[in-house]
Image (cartoon, rainbow, N blue to C red):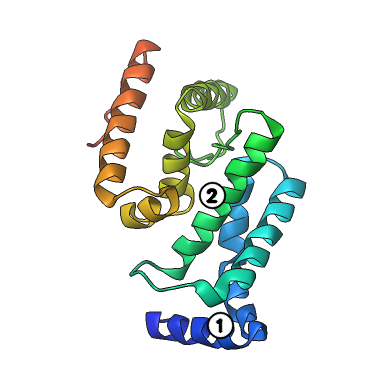
């Protein structure tokens, strides 16, 4: 779908809520994935995803194109609902980072599997120790494939601030992994 097609669908949805279905179909899987990685369970992810789209359809009339994709607006709604969800439950956000950096390839040798599991646990521990904004930045960048500008829109920051936060996050990851005896070459 082109940007013009999307804009036409948005305009149609602003005049007739039934037209919102095409936008829903286009983005529901991506938003669900994002929410699931932030809350860690299917039930809450389904509930929050439905709230995202309920809020979006309720406020589609006030949506204004600000040069970002429509998906950035949906991610921003999701981000806010997830923040409220965590705040209401007073617990630390859990992010499933299984597929963030390490790809899982079946190995022939048990030693390789054990080493991969140790590496995964170490990486998960290091990532969980990061500030929640930094974890969310990595999730949006690697799991959702968003650009720095789109991430900035979701997190309410400028693109330059996101680039800086990303750079500092990679440096922090390198330092923390080096402390644990793992040398990595993070491209900066």
Residue at image x 41%, y 68%? 69
- How many residues crowd around disc 1 within 10 Å: few (fewer than 14), some, or many (20 or more)? some
Residue 79 - label: 2
Q: Quadrant of residue 39?
A: top right
Picture layout, residue 184 above or below residue 146 = above
Front of the two marks 1 and 2: 1
- Name the residue nearer the viewer: 51 or 26: 51
Q: Which residue is mark 1?
A: 14
**x and y, in percent, of residue 79 in the image:** 54, 49
Q: Quadrant of the C terminus?
A: top left
Q: How far is mark 1 from mark 2, CA to CA?
A: 23 Å
Picture layout, residue 42 above or below residue 175 = below
Residue at image x 36%, y 51%? 152
- Residue 98 visible in the displayed image: yes
Secondary structure found at label 2 = helix
Q: Quadrant of residue 92?
A: top right
- Residue 34 visible in the displayed image: no
**x and y, in percent, of residue 129 in the image:** 48, 22
Residue at image x 53%, y 62%? 74
Q: Are marks 1 and 2 in contact (CB under 8 Å)?
A: no
**x and y, in percent, of residue 176 in the image:** 37, 18
């Amino acid at each position: 779908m082109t940007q013009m097609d999307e804009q036409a669908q948005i305009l149609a949805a602003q005049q007739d809520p039934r037209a919102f279905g095409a936008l829903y179909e286009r983005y529901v899987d991506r938003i669900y994935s994002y929410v699931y990685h932030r809350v860690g369970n299917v039930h809450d992810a389904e509930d929050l995803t439905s709230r995202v789209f309920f809020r979006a359809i309720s406020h589609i009339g006030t949506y204004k194109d600000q040069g970002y994709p429509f998906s950035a607006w949906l991610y921003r709604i999701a981000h806010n609902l997830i923040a409220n969800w965590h705040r209401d439950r007073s617990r630390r956000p859990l992010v499933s980072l299984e597929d963030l950096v390490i790809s899982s390839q079946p190995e022939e040798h048990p030693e390789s599997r054990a080493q991969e599991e140790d590496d995964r646990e170490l990486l998960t521990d290091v990532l969980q120790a990061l500030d929640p904004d930094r974890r969310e930045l990595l999730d949006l960048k690697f799991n959702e494939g968003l650009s720095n500008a789109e991430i900035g829109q979701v997190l309410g920051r400028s693109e330059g601030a996101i680039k800086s936060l990303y750079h500092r996050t990679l440096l922090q990851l390198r330092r923390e992994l080096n402390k644990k005896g793992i040398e990595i070459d993070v491209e900066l």
